[in-house]
Amino acid sequence: MGLFDGTPFERPVRCEICMQLLNDCTCPKAPQLAEPTAAQQKLQIRVEKRKYGKMVSVVSGFSCSEPRLKQLMKELKDHCGAGGSVDGHAISIQGDHVQRLRRYLREQGYKGLE
């Protein structure tokens, strides 16, 4: 008796639309949605006061994949010389770096900055 005997996992995987085996399925695939370019994104940059009076610069409004967002966070951290993190679709950089972030993002092609 196998680990998955009597469960859906022992059966071959089928297409949910036509019920054919995935290798035999001819259903049209869902189109991949393209990420908006830097110029198409509208970002907001603000400073927030966090716990113990620490200032944090927050850039929000990104419409990109998580790996791209993490790469951009690393670039912003390196540019500002500060720590930071990704929070959903926003990047937090420790300290008040609004002007520096705005200038850097404009150089990278982001136009909709508020």
Image (cartoon, helix red, strand yellow):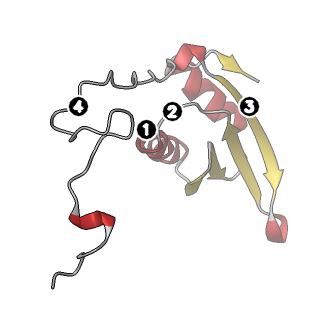
Tell me if label 2 and label 1 are in contact, CB under 8 Å.
Answer: yes
* Spot occupied by residue 51 in the image (x, y as percentages of width and height): 81, 68
Residue 68 bears which disc, if any?
1
Q: Which residue is mark 2?
A: 64
Q: Which residue is mark 4?
A: 25
Looking at the picture, tell me which residue is in the foreground, 37 or 112: 37
- Which of the two labelled residues, at mark 3 and mark 4, occupies the earlier sequence position? 4
* Spot occupied by residue 42 in the image (x, y as percentages of width and height): 68, 22
Tell me the SS state at disc 3.
strand
Crowd rating for badge 1 (residues with CA inside 10 Å; few <14, some 14–19, many 20+): few
Tell me if label 1 and label 3 are in contact, CB under 8 Å.
Answer: no
Q: Nearer the viewer, mark 4 or mark 1?
A: 4
In whole angstroms, how far apart are the C-alphas of marks 1 and 3? 18 Å
Q: Which residue is mark 3?
A: 44
Q: Amino acid at mark 2?
A: Cys
Tell me the SS state at disc 4.
loop
Q: Nearer the viewer, mark 2 or mark 4?
A: 4
Residue 97 in sight: no
